[in-house]
Image: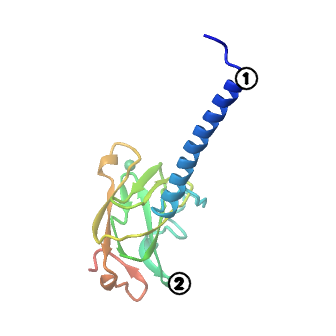
Amino acid sequence: MRADTEQDILKTELWWTAVVTVIVTIIMLAIIYAGLVHHINPPSNIETIDPKTLHLTGEFTEGNLGTKVEAGDQVTSRLVATQFAFQPQCIVVPAGRTVTLRFATPDVIHGILVTGTNVNAMVVPGYVSQVHTVFTRTGDLLMPCHEYCGLGHSQMWATVRVVPESEFRPGPDGRATCGAR
Ligand SMILES: [Cu+2]
């Protein structure tokens, strides 16, 4: 077989340049589409918290966990992920409204996902994991731990109770719980 001329080599290089450009463009468009349409984004919230004292003072003390309607009608739900349970076991949130979920852990790495939604995050000791989402489907959604955290890992799950806006009735202190339904 005859050696390629410089022209042939140039043609081949340009051809593969075009192929790579098309592939990269498709991947970039898929990432932008997933981010804008499905709200699937890489983690960006870097917020630290001391895992040794998070239950003693501040945001993640027992009395401040669960769902609360805060200033500006912002619905925020706070959970602590521990070996091998979530505290609280069940949170109630309204459908069709932006909800902020905030997680922290005092022990090891956990992971959370809410079945059938775009909520999926790691919970790493020392950091607060925050997810903004809008729940569209009402009902009890399963929220298992998806990061192996020890022997009781398979027993570790919580429930996200999504109720229609009309049934979401926080108390005078702004708090809503699964129990008071
Ligand atoms: Cu786990």
Residue 34 percent location from the top left of the image? 48, 57
Depicted 70 relative to depicted 10: above or below = below
Q: Residue 46: give x, y in percent of width and height.
A: 61, 59
Q: What element carries label 2?
A: helix
In front here: 34 or 115? Answer: 34
Q: Mark 1 points at which residue?
A: 6
Q: Marks 1/2: CA distance?
A: 69 Å
Taking depth in this image into account, of 2 and 139 the one nearest to the observer is: 2
Residues tagged 1 and 2 counted as in contact (Cβ below 8 A): no
Q: What residue type is labelled 2?
A: Ala
Q: Which amino acid does label 1 sit on?
A: Glu
Q: Is residue 84 visible?
A: yes
Q: Is residue 18 above or below residue 79?
A: above
Image point (34%, 76%), residue name: 177
Q: Quadrant of the C terminus?
A: bottom left
Residue 163, percent across and down? 30, 76
Residue 106's disc number? none
Give the SS element for disc 1: helix
Closest to the observer, 7 or 112: 7
Residue 59 lies left or right of residue 177; in this view the side is: right
Q: Can residue 125 be seen in this view?
A: no
Determine which residue is flagged by label 2: 71
The type of colouring in the image is rainbow
For this rendering, which residue is in front, 118 or 80?
118
Instruction: Say left or right for 148 vs 178.
Output: right
**Which image quadrant is residue 144 in?**
bottom left
Q: How crowded is mark 1: few (under 14 residues within 10 Å), some or many (20 or more)?
A: few
User: For the point 33% across and 58% down, which residue is it?
Assistant: 115
Quadrant of residue 88 within the rendered picture: bottom left
